[in-house]
Structures are given as structure tokens and as C-alpha cells.
Amino acid sequence: MASNNEISVLPKTNYTVIDLFAGCGGLSLGLYQADWKGLFAVEKNPNAFETLEYNLQKNKYHFDWPSWLPQGPIDILDLNKNYKAELKKLRGSVDLVAGGPPCQGFSMAGKRIKDDIRNQLVFAYIEFIKIVRPKLLLFENVKGFTYAFDKKNNPDAVPYSQIVIEKLRALDYDVKDQVIDFSEFGVPQRRKRFILVGVYKGKGGSAQQFMTLLRNQKADFLAQRQLPEHPTIQDAISDLLRNNGETATPDRKGFMSGLYGQAETDYQEYMRKDIKKDTAIPNSHSFAKHTTDKVECYKRLLASYPIRGKRIDGKEREIWNIKQRGITVLDSQAVSPTITGHPDDYLHYAEPRIMTVRECARIQSFPDWYEFKSKYTTGGEMRKKEVPRYSQVGNAIPPLFAEQAGYVLKEML
């Protein structure tokens, strides 16, 4: 007990975080579940921001949004330019800045574009860090972030990851980077991402400590929640089959949604634990309308295609009469391939259809109480402007991993 002349110092519990490029809130959700307190989130797309705001601000009051910053979608370039003085006043009070710039320009899966304007947001991120100087950084991006553009024709080219590391070190951050597969942390999905942790002037141990603690504490974290270390696709979504029955989708006119079946695994129980007991229709569990030809094609693939979990493209597409660019028949007993914003990429393991938004969200480890807003999907030129539900889920960091990272970062502080 402290004497009359001493001040009792208690551990800080409300660690503060700013989420940059927040998307629909996967990273913020995980940090919320790890008892972090958000200051604000930066996301310029109104569709994604609507989902984040509905779940984490209107329902969970996660953010202590400052009065000087309008609560709505905002571009980081505008934030840095118009609120620099206010951001500077935050120095010394921000424990963590989390999040990484949009990944499409770096992705090996899509069009890898050197001059994609989104790549320049890396420098806006560095500028934000330079202004705010948080104690810790948690930066995430696709694995392609670690590869230089056009290395074959330009031997001196360096990857953006190296640029970020050098610039952060110049700002007095100790940094450690690693490519992490989220399937190693209880997420039923093979999803490899570049993760970088930065510690400002030794105010939170060493960056290397993060990677060590993360792996050492994984088993206990999952065991405490009665979660398996390596759940399969079937473990994640077998209670969401169409043959459970269906009803009209509440927020999508002319479409049908599936009903809940009995929870069959610990993972499903965990994902469903905070929904209302009388909830019969999972949010965003609306089925696509497939043509008769497509359904027949899907039935043939489920019945006869010899390999699960392998993408069917090239000449094989013609043999199996697949009209789209390619598809993977999911393996019920394996983890999922990386969930993307393109729902047609994967065929459900047991039913002749693509997965619903909710099924994708389950595989991304979003709990069922987390509701997605805006359109379900979009196409054509609108892809450049809209981030519908499938894309929101596909772009997110799995909350289950973010929660584990959140606990480790708190321990470092």
C-alpha cells in the first residue's frame, strides 16, 4: 500500500488508438474486443464507413470522436492538410496508430500497378505518423507490398515495404516486419499479409517483442475462448446451409436469405454468441440469383470435379463449361483460400452456389452481430467508386487476429 506521501500508480487500461484506412472496421473491431479505446477512424469510402459507424460507434461507442473532426468519411490527404494543427496537439497522447493503405495497387492477385494513385497513400500515412508520433504502430498490407515493381527491368527498384521501414526509422521508430498467415491464429482462411510493428523511442519495448509474444500467446488466447487453432471451412459455416430453409431477404428486395441451422462447432457458437436468441435470419446471408445453366455447371463441379481447393481456369474452364474467369471448388475440410471482394471466385463446398456475404464474414472471423451496410455487390465502372458488402469483407483484417494483436500491444505498453 502507498504511504501518505506516495502516489499509487495504476496500470493504464484505456489505451488509445487511431485507425487509418479503417474500411468496414475489422481492425477496429478486434482492438475494441481487446479493450482499446478508439479516438477516431479515417476511411474515405461512405459505404465502408457506414458499416464501421453503425457497429462500432452507434452501437458500441468505441470512438471518443474529437469535436474538431466531422464524424464521417474523410480522405487522409484532406485530414493531414486541413487538421494538421489539431493532429499535432495529439502528440504524446496516442498509444497506437493502426491500419495500412489500400492494397489493390500492390496485390499479386489483381492488377499490380506501379502508378496506381492509391500507392501514394503510403506517403500520406508516413506524414500522419510524423505529425502525431504515436507510441506504437501496427501496419498491415498485402504480401505484394514486399516486392519491388518492375525489378526485372529496373534492378535498383525497391519495394514499398522498404521505403516505409526506412522512413519510420528516420522518425525514431524501432520496426519489425514479417509476413504472417492469419490461418495460424485461429482464422479459417489462408491469408498472408505483411505486418509491421513500430515502437517510438523505446516507449513500448522492442518491435521484435510483438512477434514473439503474438506466437507465444496464441494457444492460450484460443483455448480461453474454446476456439480451435485450425478451424476448417465446414467448422465455420456448416450452420448456414441453404437447405436449412429460406425467407425473403429483409434488406434486399427480390432475393432470398438463409435461416440459421443448429450451431455444430465451437467456432460457430463463438460467432453467434452475442446475437439475440430469437434471431432466425443471419445478417447479410442473402443468396445470389444464379442462372439455370450456372447452377447445372456448379452441380457438375460438386459431383465430379476431382480436386478441391484448386482454381479452375485456362482450358479446363472450357471442358467444364465455366463461363466466368475461373472458380475454386471449396474444400470443406481445409481452410479457405483468401476471401476477396469477388464473390464468384469460390463455389460453396456442398451447395451449387457462391457464398453469401455472411459466410465470407464468418471465414474472416466477423461475429454475426456485426452488420454490413450498403449494396451487396456492384460491377463495371462503379467498382471504382463503391465498396459494397462483399468488398468490405474481402478488404478487412480478420478481427480475431486483430484482437490477439491488440492484447499483445497492450502488454508491450
Image (cartoon, rainbow, N blue to C red):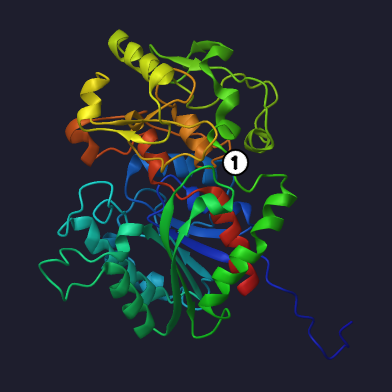
Q: Nearer the viewer, residue 354 or 90?
A: 354
- Looking at the image, the residue that sits furthest to the front is 306
Q: Going by the image, does 215 lie left or right of 121?
A: right
Instruction: Give the x, y percent position of residue 75.
Output: 30, 55
Instruction: Identify the residue shown where x is 42% and y is 20%.
Output: 302
- Residue furthest bottom as drawn: 5
Q: Position of residue 141 (x, y in %)?
A: 37, 58
Task: Indicate the quadrant where residue 368 lies.
Answer: top right
Residue 12 image point, x, y percent: 68, 71
**Residue behind mark 1:** 231
- Name the residue: 43% across, 47% down: 396
Q: Is residue 134 visible?
A: yes
Q: Which quarter shows the C terminus? A: bottom right
Q: Is residue 320 above or below residue 12?
A: above
Looking at the rendering, in which quadrant would you find the N terminus?
A: bottom right
Q: Quadrant of residue 286?
A: top left
Residue 292 falls left or right of residue 212: left
